[in-house]
Every structure is written in C-alpha cells, then in structure tokens.
Image: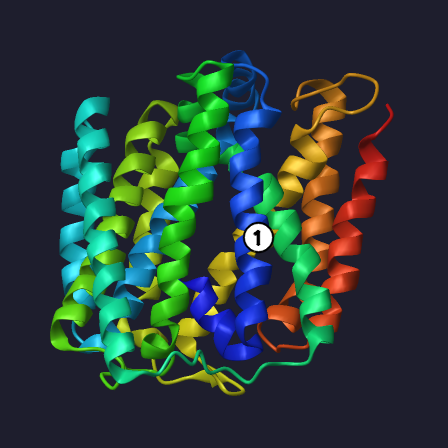
Amino acid sequence: MFLPVLLVRDYGVWGFVVFAAPNVVGAAAMGWVLADSAAAERILARHTPACRAFSGVTIAFHLFFLQWLGTKITGEWWIIALVVTPIAAAILMGRSQRVMLALAAAVWALSAAAFVSVTRDRAATGDWSLGGRGGPPVDLLWLAPVCAFGFALCPYLDPTFLRARRECGRGAARAAFTLGFGAFFLAMILLTLLYAPMFRGERFNMAFAGVATLGLLVGHVTTQAIFTCAAHWKESLPLGRGPLVALPLLGLALGLPFVHGWSIGPMPSHEVVYRCFMAFYGLVFPAYVWICAIPTPDGHSGLRGERGRRKLLVWSGAVGLAAPFFWMGFIQLSEFYLAPGLLIVLTARLAVRRG
C-alpha cells in the first residue's frame, strides 16, 4: 500500500489512479474468475512452488519495508521490525481462522483510526495538496499497462487469496472479494493518498501531522505488515519451509545499514531495493501466471510433462530478456522501456500455445 507514495511524488494524482484502479479491479475479479473452490485447489496443487515463492518473497518484502520505514522516522526502528515481526508471525501462524479474523478486524480498525486522524490533521492545516512533479502523461501511458498486467495476474499465486476462494461458495466469494477490495482495501489505499506528502522525503514530515497521527500511521503500516506476514506464514507452512526461512532472512539483510549510503542517480538505496522487490509483482509472478498457469487453447494446464518444462524455460527466458527493460523503466525512470519489456513477456506465450 506504500507504492502510491512514490507514484504520487513522481506523477501526481494520476499516478495513484494508475495504481489503484487495476489493483482493486484485479484483486476483486479473482472472486468472479475462479468459478468454484476446486479451481483454487487446482492452482495450489499445480503451482505449489510458485505459491511458496510468492509467500516467501512477500514476507521478505514486508520485513525489508518495516526497516525502511524505521529509517524514515527514527533511524533505529529497523531493530523493532527485526525482532517483532518474526515473533508475531510465529505466534499467529498456528492460530485458528476465527482468531485471524478477529485480528484482521482489529488491524483494520486501527487503520481506520489513522484515516480519521490524518484527515483531521490535514483539515486543520487547510493543505490538501498532494505535491509531486506531475510527470508528463506519456510516462503513465507506459506504466499503466505494466500495473494492469501485474495486478490482474498476481492474485492467482497468493495462497491467502486462494484460501479465501476455497472457503467460499460462488456467491459468497464474489461478495467477499468485491467488498474486501472495493471497500475495505480501497479505503486503505485512499489513506495512503492522504499521507503521501508526509512520507515523501527521507524522513517523516511533521508539518502535515501531529505526534498522535504519526503514531497511528506507524501502527497502521506496522500491524498491516505483521498481519500479512503471519497470514502468509500460516498458509505456506504446508507448502514447505525452505523459502519461508531463506527469503525472509534476505529481506532482513537488505534492510540492514550496509545498503545505506549509495544511490542510483537521485534514487537512494532503500528505494532501489523496494522497487526491485516490486519487480516480482510487476514482472516475475504475473509472467509466470501468463505463461505457465493459464491453460493453453489445446487444454494443457500446469507444468506436467514436456510441455510444462517448455513453459518454465519460456518463462525464465522471457523474464531474463525483459528484466533490463524493467530496470530502465523503474530504476532509471525511463518509462518508455517498459513497453518493449512487457511486449517480450506477452508475446512469449505464443511459444507455449501449441505442443
């Protein structure tokens, strides 16, 4: 939910729209696209390693981000993230679904309180500006298809989403995903839009908020991240422990001080690492769904047999060829390069359509 802070900074309010619209629609659509709970079961069974990797990367990403957040506020809070998050995840992973539901409600209530506090503080200052350089619209024309591609396909590798779909009937799934992302999640990213100017610099800007609001925002971001880690840990333990140990440790390592003090152009080290994590959700995982998970016209699905090995080879080749273009687009901020990068991935599917 923090990505809009960077997009609003770089492109103005239209950067938020390019993020929010495909995110909400893509996630909500999962409840409609998967016809029944068996469809979610098949995805999990046929693509277990990919779902396992998705959870591992997600946990690593959140642990890294909490450390980055700490440097924005005090410079020392990464220690808290290092200690609290794994402990909270370990405690929560064995809890019942009823407990997880209650915790989710509590986390959302804290976030709602942060929404009220931010709105009150901004109203008191009378400053509703979002800032940002308001980049030329052409930049967003290259970024928008990548956002749509990533947010449309990533949900199908998320084990927590797959559990939600498995445990709901058709009508309940449609209602749950539509309400969950069209209302509750939408409110959270609107909160991001409101606090974007406060977190834009290397340190938190107290000109927009008081101490109470800062505390609620830190609580909002931290508890959401901890709950997400716990949910992914809980869902992925049956899938295997390897990535759930190695990848989170990588996320912690990337947040340690040794990544401070360098930059690529005007982009500081932590933002570079953050954007590299986002590449998993904009390139690696959606490309896997596009090339390997969606059934081919002749009915082949999954990774079985020679066709499956061919899919993996095509996927890895497409990601490798597209990665330099995504680097140019997301790190060097030459957004035009995103177009050929995405085109490589989209056309790669032609190589697996027939045996």
Q: Is residue 351 rendered to the left or right of residue 320?
A: right
| Quadrant in the rendering for residue 302 | top right
- Residue 67, compared with residue 33, is above or below; it is below
Q: Position of residue 270 (x, y in %)?
A: 39, 73
- Image label count: 1
Q: Is residue 102 rendered to the left or right of residue 143?
A: left
Is residue 90 visible to the viewer in this orientation of the structure?
Answer: yes
Q: Position of residue 4 (x, y in %)?
A: 47, 65
x 66%, y 56%: residue: 146
x 18%, y 69%: residue: 213
| Quadrant in the rendering for residue 69 | bottom left
x 78%, y 46%: residue: 346
Q: What's the colour scheme?
A: rainbow
Is residue 72 visible to the viewer in this orientation of the structure?
Answer: no
Q: Position of residue 256 (x, y in %)?
A: 28, 69
Are there few (<14), some (14-19), or many (20+) residues within 10 Å of tag 1? some
Q: Tell me the residue that label 1 is attached to.
A: 21
Q: Is residue 63 rendered to the left or right of residue 315?
A: left
Please tell me whether mark 1 sits on a helix, a strand or a loop.
Answer: helix
Q: Position of residue 310 (x, y in %)?
A: 75, 31
x 38%, y 52%: residue: 187
- Residue 62, compared with residue 164, is above or below; it is below
User: Which quadrant holds the C terminus?
Assistant: top right
Check disc 1 and give the amino acid type.
Ala
Q: Nearer the viewer, residue 17 or 78?
A: 17
Q: Nearer the viewer, residue 50 or 226?
A: 226
User: Which quadrant holds the N terminus?
Assistant: bottom left
